[in-house]
Image (cartoon, grey):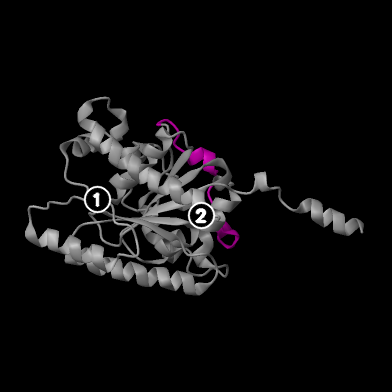
Amino acid sequence: MASFFSKFKEQPHADDLPKGKVISFLNQKGGVGKTTMAYNTAFALAEEGHKVLCLDLDPQANLSLLFDAEKTGETHIHHLLINSIRELKALHVGSLVDDVLIKDKGVDLLPAGQELSGFELSVAGINSPRQLILKTFLEKNDLLKRYDYIIVDCPPTLGLLVVNILCASQGVMIPFKADEFSRKGLAHFYDVLGDVSEMGITRAPDVLAHIPNMVDLRRKQESKDLKVITEEREHALTVDPFFNRAQLVKSQAQKKSVFSYKSKEYLPLQKRFSGLAGIITKWNEQYEH
């Protein structure tokens, strides 16, 4: 009887369970604005009062550049992921999550570095599930308890790093350009998503929205491609297009989110990114039901 009650007491209280959600911005094609979308949506969520962490998992480290984090030192997310794997103890470094965390912009960041390009090779010989390294890292460090949302900027590939991201994510946002390359890229992404689902080791993430970006509807072919992509992917929400705006270029050049500006000319962009944040929060309210 005593052992029964001791086991009962060990069950986690509902308040102790992780509440945070991992939302990845993903497209295997580069140059579609993943970093811009992830960065400004993270700040839109923070504007609503949520505690937000960004993970830069692209070796190009463009998200880290927006946070000025490329100047902070040699240790980054790649080293923390390797630290979380017991079998790779010989490669561990003496840094913890809070040693690497960038916390000075209202949204926190775990920065990237070039070493991420060798992630797949680094973990090739381990026996533990290689697809769950990121998920295990987030759980071991209680990051889903510390943050309401973890926004991931993904590399433009569909390799092991992206499979890790999909296995760790609950939701995916897909920025794309309206062209034939993106149409093919979306088809490949859904194939990989199906593979993750078939693995059966974790719940595959929900696709929350397709985000047409850098759209110029004056080009007939672009309008046609956007219509085809939207119709082919009608099972998922496609939001209104984001057009090329000088304000977005300016804010990126100054390494600021659109929410850093009080000028009325930034209001339309602020509303658009608040809309993306609203898609995420509305989905989150229904996720467990």
**Viewed as shown, does residue 140 lie left or right of 230?**
right
Q: Is residue 203 visible?
A: yes
Pointer 1 residue: 240
Q: Compare residues 210 and 97 and report the one nearer the observer.
A: 210
Q: Compare residues 115 and 19 and report the one nearer the observer.
A: 19
Give, as a three-letter code, the residue at label 2.
Tyr
Q: Compare residues 138 and 186 and report the one nearer the observer.
A: 186
89 w.r.t. 126: above or below: above
118 w.r.t. 255: above or below: below
Pointer 2 residue: 287
Mark closer to the chain start, 1 or 2: 1
**Viewed as shown, does residue 195 lie left or right of 181?**
right
**Viewed as shown, does residue 277 lie left or right of 270?**
right
In percent of width and height, residue 262 lies at 27, 25
Give, as a three-letter code, the residue at label 1.
Asp
Residue 49, magenta (yes or no): no
Region of the chain picked out in magenta, as a range: 83-105
Q: Dot 1 lies on which element?
A: loop
- Mark 2 burial class by Cα count in 10 Å: few <14, some 14-19, many 20+: few
In percent of width and height, residue 235 lies at 34, 65
**Viewed as shown, does residue 29 lie left or right of 153?**
left
Instruction: Tell me the CA gap for discs 1 and 2.
Output: 24 Å
